[in-house]
Structure formats: C-alpha cells, structure tokens
Amino acid sequence: MERAAGASIDSAVPLRRDPDWLTLPAAAGRWWSLDLPVKNLRTELTARVWSPAQETARVLVVHDGPDYDKHAGLSRYVAASITAGRIEPCHLVLLPAGDRFDWYAAFPAYARGLGQEILPRLTDRLSPGRPVAGVGASLGALAMLHCQRRHPESFAGLFLQSGSFFQPRFDRQESGFGRYLPIVRWTGRVMRADDGPGVPVTMTCGSLEENLANNRSMAEALRAQGYEVTLAQIEGGHDWPAWRDAFDPHLTALLRRIWPSGHPPHHRTTND
C-alpha cells in the first residue's frame, strides 16, 4: 500500500474483537435536548446532547446520531474513553437523520442548513468560535464531507465510515437509488478538484463492502488535495458492529490528533 504525503499508511485488516470500552468505567455527564430550527429545510430538529461533568469546548457532531448510539454505543465509547484518558472531554451531539435519503445525498439545502444554521447554533452554545469534529456513516459520511467542502471553517476533522461516494466505475449497482446521479455528479467534482479545504480525516471501510473501492478512490483524491487522510480497511461489512469496532483505535486516534491532551481545541480556517 502507498504512503501519501501528510497521511499514514492504510491499515491492514484487524482481527475482530469486543471493544474494551464496553466494560470500562464511564465518565459522569448529563443528557439534554437542543431544538434546532433549520430554515433551509423548513423544519426543526431536536438534537440529543451528552455533556461531560468537566468543562470543555470540544464538540463531536454525529449524523444518524440516535442510531449510532443505539446500535453502536457511541456515547458509551465517548464516556469510557474520557475516563480512560484516551480522548479529551467533549460534548457529543446526536443529530437525527430526518429525511436521510434526500438530506444526506449531496443535497445542497441540507449542507446549507448544517453549515449555516445547525453548527453555528451548536458552537454558540457549546464552543464559541471553535470548529467541531464530524462523524457519519454511509450517506451520513457523504453528507458530512459535502458540508465540510462548503463550510470548511466549521470542522476540525472528520470521521467517515463506509462513505457512499458513488462513482459509475464502481457503483452502477446503486443506480436505482433516487439521488444516485446527484451523488455521482458531486463526487466527480470532488475527484477532479485540484485542491481542497483540507482537515484531518479518518475513513474506515469494511473488507467485505461494495463501498471499499470508492472509499479508496476518495481517500486518494483527498490526500492529493491536502487533506491528512488515514484510510483503515476493517473487518466486516456495511453494518453497525463493524462501525462500532472501529471507534478504537481509529476514532480515538483522530480525536487525539485534533484535540491534543492538555491544549484547548484550536480554530482552523481553510480556503475552498
């Protein structure tokens, strides 16, 4: 496998194991709700937020958030990893998916809503003036990158799992999906770009997935555009157990990189 400038070597497929954070002590914190009016989508979303007992300005925003927590135990991972000293304390924001097959499929109105309304409201409340880390899987990963390309100042880094970066040479089997062509057109524009608003990005994709080829292709393109990319080929397929098992070490490593221990999160600005 190739080493790219500014990026790590793609990792080999690890053996599947039960993550230890399932049984480690969890940091104290509280759950609360935040209403998010989104004029671009003519709706209002209610995010579930977990805040640690420690004061912090770090924020982790998650697409398909309630499902990530229900099926992959994301809040358990965060709380246990804080207690273990693996990551810095952070707020965990679980965004509901809404009409995900439209909103998350390279939909400009959603990118505007996330970048111009949702994230500014979150940062005003939780971390004034500081960018957030974004997490998404499948279409949720696509939507997170889509927004980052349009609003790069909002993001400190991205954790993208099994992204649906459809390309005709790899994904003709997906052509029956209603927003296949908008995704293909947007992905093509990203692939052809000379540079990009680079931030640290960790991508994971299962060795059994149809998405593996398009994730490899997207990782290569982003690296060439100045993103610091790590692509981890993991065991399993396009499912919650595979995504859950990749949190540690891959999400852990990303968060340690963008939120170094003992230092406040910095504000990163880039040009599109």
Image (cartoon, rainbow, N blue to C red):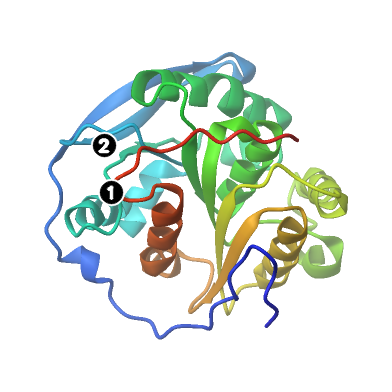
Quadrant holding the N terminus: bottom right
Residue at 25% in and 57% down: 81
Residue at 15% in and 36% down: 53
Residue 231: numbered disc: none
Q: Secondary structure at mark 2?
A: strand
Residue at 66% in and 67% down: 211
Q: Is residue 229 left or right of residue 258?
A: right
Q: Amino acid at mark 2?
A: Trp
Whether residue 199 is visible here, answered yes or no, is yes
Q: Which residue is mark 1?
A: 75
Q: Give the alpha-carbon distance from disc 1 to disc 2, as whole Å.
A: 8 Å
Residue 50: numbered disc: 2
Whether residue 102 is visible here, answered yes or no, is no
Q: Position of residue 101 (x, y in %)?
A: 62, 42
Q: Is residue 180 left or right of residue 251?
A: right
- Mark 2 nearby-residue class (10 Å; few <14, some 14–19, many ≥20): many
Q: Are marks 1 and 2 in contact (CB under 8 Å)?
A: yes
Q: Secondary structure at mark 1?
A: helix
Q: Position of residue 60 (x, y in %)?
A: 40, 41
